[in-house]
Image: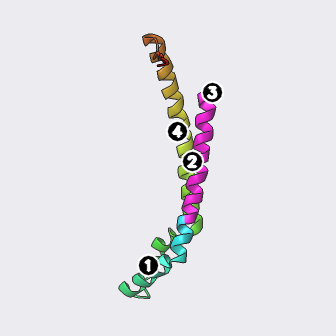
Amino acid sequence: MVGDEASFLLSVAAGIMLVVAAAFVWFMLDTMHVFSTIQDLLDTMMDSSYNAYSALLEYMKFSRAISMATVIAVVNIILTTALATIGAFLYNITAALVGGVHLTLADE
């Protein structure tokens, strides 16, 4: 089917855009010093000897953000391709049963 390849390529393009967008947002937040501000806030709120908030800061690392964006992109590619294939199959069955949509254009 032609639609399967097209839906796969479009979902791969969307996955690449998701990973690039995640990297861009992370770099913008890092440039605006959001992560250091959060760390300073946690240092102020909690005792400096208490190091339980390091797990929170671990999730804000660049490698973790890109890894999660990549996992989400791969899952999105699989689901989008599968759903597009099922949608095309259901459309073809419906068009065969009903006769499809006939469009007549008139030149006026």
What secondary structure is marked by label 2?
A: helix
Classify 10 Å Cα crowding around label 3: few (below 14), some (14-19), many (20 and above): few
Distance between mark 4 and mark 3 Cα atoms:
15 Å
| Residue under numbered circle 4 | 80
Which badge, 4 or 2, is on the more N-terminal residue?
Answer: 2
Which badge, 4 or 3, is on the more N-terminal residue?
Answer: 3
What secondary structure is marked by label 1?
A: helix
Mark in front: 4 vs 2: 2
Distance between mark 3 and mark 2 Cα atoms:
19 Å
Could you say which is closer to the camera, residue 96 or residue 49? Answer: 96
What secondary structure is marked by label 3?
A: helix
Q: Residue 38 carries which label?
A: 1
Looking at the rendered structure, the kind of residue marked 3 is Val
Residue 34 pos. (x, y %): 47, 76
Q: Which mark is residue 2?
A: 3
Classify 10 Å Cα crowding around label 2: few (below 14), some (14-19), many (20 and above): some
Looking at the rendered structure, the kind of residue marked 4 is Thr
Could you say which is closer to the camera, residue 21 or residue 71? Answer: 21
